């Protein structure tokens, strides 16, 4: 049961919010300098303005709520949920000023989509967007993928018990005994892959005769959006822009790595590669990819219109990997989905809904929860079919050997049900706006599971109500309900304090 | 008289249908890229003519290059050769409006030569509207507001820093 809040909670929550806002403001200096370097003065001014505004808002919050106390659990959760909303508004300012969005709502949609590593976009004329602004879209993905609070607080603010908020950003496990060490490890892994990934993409782009400056820009953006399973791209055509199977291959490789549990990364990095073969979540993940690909293939059996198997495999498997890892990269045009058979689209929806591994940058239900539920069902069936005195124990290996307990199964089942409810609710809202059920469900699952694939509903011209719905879905989906529920409780208790 | 009337109307209708069909299938008539997506199977393997702004980069090496063209909000990849590449002066990006080109070539829904790409293999390409540099529009009011905001922020920061001194990793004031 979430305890009631009192007015005394407001101070610490808004104090830490002030710190996060200042931290986010400092991050705006990165696109500002990119603008200056490229002599893009208009966007550079926009980022300077937002940087100053963030510092001003953060300073005001710190001045008004000056007392720095250690956060308790519920305050930490509220800070997380609130920070993501504030980050969306701040991140939207330079986007809106760029003139590439129809309204501030559209810019907010884009910012939430980036921070939540979704990748749904309502940008207009992306081809003529400045480097600074385009970089900011991808940088938001990277910040959001790592965790806004984690980025803002680990690097820009020190002290206190701020790491209590770690779990609020849907990171369930402490990979290492200490949460600071865990955060550092996540950064170490991400930055190492950043160097490797950028170098690979840069090499491929230069090999395609793209000028070195632009090749580097594309490479960094491709990596940031891929590793953090966001799926934004520098160009509107997404991965289809490159017309290069090698780009498909390398992006698929990095998104798969990004969708693997950081705990598994840690164990493998510390010299235990056998974990890859033993890990229950990873084995289930591979099984799930194969099973959903089978559904997609089955869908195409009656409607096979590809000239050869390679064309079919490249189109179908890439979209499936993109859906299952939650990246949302696409090597086909949005309109191509219109030609896909219903069963194949259903396979993609299931893959999106299931998502990637826990404690990764992927969204969705998460495979480990499915695994725990399956183990729980197996355990119950064994109990039902065994003599009364039999003690039934179910175990699985996930970094260490874990015994399945009722509490694990209950929590997994609750989360799965919440996600399914979120998917269906968004689908129903989409239908109420006049869209066909399949497309509405596709888009809803894509938003809630932070995937970013689209059947064409998401556009600057979709109804505002649906934009708000998807923003809320992306926010709730990324934070995995808990911190949002705590924030709602906080806001309700402000209205009617006990 | 009535029969003659019906005959004339029928001839006109027939001509209209034949003429309309000829218009659509005419390889020289510019087809919106949107149509290639909406009715892709109809044009698969046929010679088509499209027009649009060259955007992004010219990619490739040796004899074969890729360009992407944008027509309304639809995009398609065009395969061009080295000599056709030389024609293109501007590719659309920030501060640059790309050349508007007219391309005639064979359209493939899933090109087997390019791992299933939806593309057009260009046979003929010409610029119908040259690209140009777009000067930046720096708004003075944004600059003035930023300067004013800078002064206010500096004042707030100093005050905030005074009231909330930096803390070390243990949370103690430095």
Image: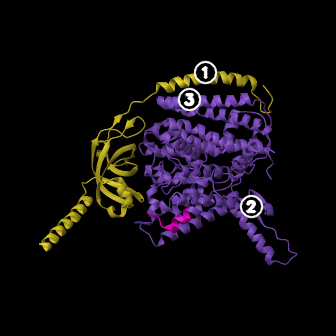
Mark 1 crowd level (few <14, some 14–19, many ≥20, 10 Å Cα): few
Pair 2/1: label in front = 1
Q: Which chain is displayed in yellow in the rendered image?
A: B
Q: Tell whether position A90 is magenta.
A: no
Image coords of residue A413 (percent x, y)? 72, 62
* Scheme by which the image is coloured: by chain
Which range is magenta? A339-348
| Residue bearing the label numbered 1 | B151
Residue under numbered circle 2: A397
* Letter of the chain that mark 1 sits on in the rendering: B
Q: Chain for mark 2? A: A
Asked whether the residues under marks 3 and 2 belong to the same chain, the reply is: yes
Chain in purple in the render: A
Q: How far apart are marks 1 and 3 (CA)?
A: 12 Å
Quadrant of the snapshot with the C terminus of chain A:
top right
Helix, strand or loop for disc 2 = strand
Coordinates of residue A364 in the picture (x, y in percent): 63, 56
| Residue under label 3 | A49
Cα–Cα gap, marks 2 and 1: 58 Å
Decide if residue A274 is in sight here.
no
B46 displayed left or right of A68: left
Q: Check the image and name the residue furthest to the left.
A: B1
- The image quarter in which residue A111 lies: top right
Neighbor class of circle 3 (other Cα within 10 Å; few <14, some 14-19, many 20+) is: many
Disc 2: CA contacts within 10 A as few (<14), some (14-19) or many (>=20) = few
Which x, y percent locates residue A412? Answer: 73, 60
A78 over A324 or under it: above or below: above
Eye-nearest disc, 3 or 2: 3
At x 74%, y 69%, the residue is: A377
């Amino acid at each position: 049961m979430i305890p009631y809040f009192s007015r005394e909670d407001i101070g610490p929550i808004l104090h830490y919010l002030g710190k996060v806002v200042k931290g986010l403001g400092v991050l705006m200096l990165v696109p500002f300098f990119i603008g200056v370097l490229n002599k893009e003065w208009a966007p550079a001014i926009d980022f300077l303005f937002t940087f100053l505004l963030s510092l001003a808002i953060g300073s005001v919050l710190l001045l008004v709520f000056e007392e720095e106390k250690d956060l308790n659990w519920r305050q930490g959760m509220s800070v997380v949920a609130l920070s993501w909303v504030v980050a969306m508004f701040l991140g939207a300012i330079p986007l809106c000023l760029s003139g590439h969005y129809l309204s501030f709502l559209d810019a907010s949609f884009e910012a939430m989509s980036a921070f939540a590593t979704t990748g749904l976009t309502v940008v207009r004329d992306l081809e003529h967007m400045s480097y600074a602004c385009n970089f900011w879209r991808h940088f938001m993905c990277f910040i959001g993928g790592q965790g806004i609070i984690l980025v803002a607080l680990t690097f820009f603010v020190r002290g206190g018990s701020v790491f209590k908020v770690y779990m609020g950003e849907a990171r369930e496990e402490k990979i290492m005994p200490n949460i600071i060490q865990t955060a550092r490890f996540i950064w170490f892994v991400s930055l190492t892959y950043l160097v490797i990934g950028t170098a690979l993409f840069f090499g491929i782009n230069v090999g395609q005769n793209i000028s070195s400056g632009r090749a580097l820009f594309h490479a960094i953006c491709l990596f940031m959006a891929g590793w953090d399973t966001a799926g934004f791209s520098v160009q509107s055509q997404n991965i289809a822009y490159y017309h290069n199977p090698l780009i498909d291959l390398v992006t698929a490789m990095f998104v798969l790595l990004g969708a693997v549990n950081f705990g598994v990364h840690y164990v493998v990095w510390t010299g235990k590669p056998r974990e890859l073969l033993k890990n229950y979540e990873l084995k289930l993940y591979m099984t799930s990819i194969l099973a959903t690909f089978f559904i997609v293939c089955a869908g195409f059996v009656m409607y096979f219109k590809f000239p050869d198997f390679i064309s079919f495999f490249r189109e179908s498997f890439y979209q499936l990997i993109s859906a299952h890892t939650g990246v949302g990269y696409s090597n086909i045009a949005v309109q191509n989905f219109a030609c896909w058979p219903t069963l194949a689209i259903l396979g993609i929806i299931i893959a999106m809904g299931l998502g990637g591994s826990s404690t990764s940058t992927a969204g969705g239900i998460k495979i480990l929860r499915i695994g725990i539920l399956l183990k729980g069902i197996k355990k119950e069936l064994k109990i039902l079919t065994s003599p009364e005195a039999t003690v039934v124990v179910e175990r699985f290996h996930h970094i260490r050997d874990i015994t399945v307990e009722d509490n694990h199964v209950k929590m997994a089942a609750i989360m799965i049900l919440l996600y399914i409810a979120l998917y269906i609710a968004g689908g129903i809202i989409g239908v109420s706006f006049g869209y066909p059920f399949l497309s509405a469900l596709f888009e809803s699952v894509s938003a809630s599971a932070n995937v970013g694939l689209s059947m064409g509903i998401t556009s600057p011209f979709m109804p505002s109500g649906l934009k708000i719905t998807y923003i809320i879905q992306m926010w709730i989906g990324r934070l995995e309900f808990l911190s949002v529920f705590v924030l709602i409780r906080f806001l309700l208790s402000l209205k009617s304090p006990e | 008289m009535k029969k003659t009337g019906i005959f004339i109307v029928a001839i006109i209708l027939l001509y209209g249908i034949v003429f309309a069909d000829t218009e659509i299938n005419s390889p020289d008539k510019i087809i919106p890229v949107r149509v290639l997506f909406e009715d892709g199977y109809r044009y698969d393997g046929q010679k088509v003519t499209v027009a649009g702004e060259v955007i992004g980069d010219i990619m490739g090496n040796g004899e074969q290059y890729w360009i992407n063209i944008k027509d309304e909000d639809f995009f398609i990849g065009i395969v061009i050769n080295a000599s056709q590449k030389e024609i293109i002066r501007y590719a659309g990006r920030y501060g640059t409006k790309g050349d508007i080109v007219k391309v005639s070539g064979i359209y493939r829904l899933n090109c087997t030569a390019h791992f299933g790409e939806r593309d057009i293999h260009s046979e003929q390409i010409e610029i119908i509207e040259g690209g140009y540099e777009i000067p930046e529009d720096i708004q003075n009011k944004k600059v003035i507001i930023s300067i004013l905001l800078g002064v206010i922020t500096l004042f707030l920061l100093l005050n905030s820093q005074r009231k909330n001194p930096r803390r070390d990793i243990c949370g103690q004031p430095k």
